[in-house]
Structures are given as C-alpha cells and as structure tokens.
Image (tube, rainbow, N blue to C red):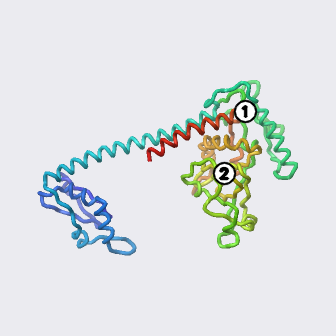
Amino acid sequence: MGRCAVVQPEQEGWLCGTGSFVLRFPIVLCSEYIAVCLRSPYSVEYLSGNSIGNTMLNLNQAILKSILLPVPPCTEQKRIINAVFVANEHLAEISNQSEALVACVAKTKAKILDLAIRGQLVPQDPTDEPASVLLERIRAEKEELIKQGKIKRDKKESVIFRGEDNSYYEKIGDYVRCIDSELPFELPDSWMFVRLKHIGEVVGGGTPKTNISEYWDGNIPWLTPADFSGYEEMYVSSGARTITEIGLKSSSAQMLPANSVLYSSRAPIGYIAIAANPVSTNQGFKSVVPYDFSMSPYLYYCLKARTDDIIQRATGTTFKEISGSEMAETIIPLPPFTEQKRLVAKATQLLNVIATIEKSLS
C-alpha cells in the first residue's frame, strides 16, 4: 500500500488491476509532483492511519480523496520535480558507490585472512620455533588427555608430512597416501598442514526439552546460531537464553571450556566466536576445543578463512550442514606459535580499521 507511479503520455493500452486506483488530474497540475506528494512520509502515515481492514489493510476512494495535499504554483511544481529528480540521481549514485565499497570491504577482509593463513601477512622470522615442535607438544597434551580418560583415541589417527619429493602425504596406520589435491596452497618451510582433529576436539551441542521449565533459565549460557547474527566480536560470553545443570545433563548439550572456538555448522555455516567463559550450545554448532588454548585466536581467524572450503564439504537438501566427523577432517595451515601471535595482532589491527570504515558507510 502506498506505491505510486506516473503513466507517461506515450504509454497507451495499459490496464489497472484490482488493489489499485487511477488518479487523473487537470493538466495544470503536474502528475509527477502529485506522485512526490503521495510518496512523502506525511501521505504514507495518513493513508496507513486511516486504512480499513483487519487481515489486510486497504484504502477506499473516500479515504484517498480525503487526503490534503499542498499545491504550489505550476512553475514551482516543475522546479520541485527537477530538484527531486537531480537529488534522486545523486542518491542512486551514492547507493551504487556504497554497494561497490561494501563489496570491496568484504573482499579486503577475506584477503587479509587469506594472506594470514598463507604466511604472507607478516614477515617470516627464521628464528621462530617451527610448527613441527608445536605439533609435538600438542600430541603430548592429547596423549595425556587420553590417559586421563577425558577424550578417546581416534581409531583413524593420522600424520601429515612432506616427502622428499616435496609432495604431502598422510599416514593412517601402515597406509600412506598423497594428499596434494586436498591442499589449498603452498606454505612457508616452518609451517605444517594439519587436520582440525590433530589440534583439537570437535564437539557438538544439544537442546533440552523446551516444555520442561526446570531445564531453562539457569546459570549456564546456552547459545544458538541466531545469537551470532550480526555479531562481529572475537569473544562471546552468553546468548539470549540459559539452561540449568539438569537441562545440560538431560540433553546432548555439553559444557565447553573458556577459549573454545564456537563454530555454527548449519543455518548458516560459519558463524564463529571464542567462548570468553564456559558455555554450552545447541546442535547447530561443531565447536573446537583446542588442546592448546593459546592457539584459539589464530584458530578463530583460520576457520573464518577456511569457511568456504567447509561449506563446499557440507551436505543436506533443506539446508547444508557440516558433520562433526567432516569438520574434524578440515585441513588447516599451522604456523609457528610466535608467528601465530604476530598474525593475530596484525589481522586484528587491519580488521579494526576496516570495521571503522564499515561504520562510516552505515
């Protein structure tokens, strides 16, 4: 309701269907000027406020005829129309430029993350402890967690290594295969490719029964992908709802420790944040609990950069979803730990500058 357009004199043979009115004016009135008046906030508010109907609001001829419109002299009507036309051209140009700039900003953000995980965002330091040493520490930590019974040993435990021919191979038990086709790009010598399961545990979530009040409004933060819509901060502490200890135990939801990387696995894939404190999630997440929590900020940026790859491996008809097992197989580049810190600092600095630009656009 409230849309209007002017039929040009050369447009003959047109028809007006139900749900609309034809307004005819004397030639001394400029139809384009009347259209401007009818599109004004005053007219829209008046017609909406006086419309009739319950299920769907409607106008009748009496309401439309009753609206008061300001009528200036003919020459001024034309000057007003010319001014509106010029203003609309400027607004359209601004809108087009803003859309182009928004697209450029999005590409720039993606490029920063892409350079970061390729080892091209900050200079390489030959004195850095190589990623292979970091990975050995992670493996030792993982073994300790297995001994303590906190995690289970992966039946398909694998190791990725570079052969003498500079190709990459993966060893699972006694079986070795070349995985060059799975790798997205080349890495600096001090980096390594690993699967997500090599550096952390992938954990799903769950939802307590919503019709049992004892499961809800407790002291455990419970997040859904909807809580991440429009959320741009690196850390998150809570969502719209909370659950109780009983609710947690009654469902497949799990308590995730602080510094877990929360990653939405459906509707949509790719919402991400780091838990600032212990939290739980619904089943729309495949979160990563790193074996070394100091890696969480790098993993946050890395998974952002690898989201397109994760989406391509998702399955489903109604909506795409990445399974926990498939999420665990995600290949990511692992830099030396000291370089991780430099990458996170630089990426954060650049993305903060871009965030300031985005705010100015809105």
Residue 74 placement, left or right of 250: left
Name the residue that disc number 1 marks.
Answer: 336
User: Which residue position is annotated with label 2?
Assistant: 262
Residue drawn at (23%, 73%) of the image: 62
Task: Work out whether residue 331 or residue 61 is closer to the camera in this orientation and state it.
Answer: 61
In the depicted structure, whether residue 300 falls above or below residue 339 = below
| Circles 2 and 1 in contact, beta carbons < 8 Å | no
Numbered tag placed on residue 352 in the rendering: none
Neighbours of disc 1 within 10 Å: few (<14), some (14-19), many (20+): many
Disc 2/disc 1 C-alpha distance (Å): 23 Å
SS class, disc 1: loop
Kind of residue sitting beneath label 2: Leu
Q: Within the image, what quadrant is residue 109 found in?
A: top right
**In the image, is residue 20 above or below residue 338?**
below
Q: Secondary structure at mark 2?
A: strand
Residue 176 position within the rendered picture, expressed as x and y whole percent measured from the top left:
78, 35
- Residue 309: x and y in percent read 62, 42
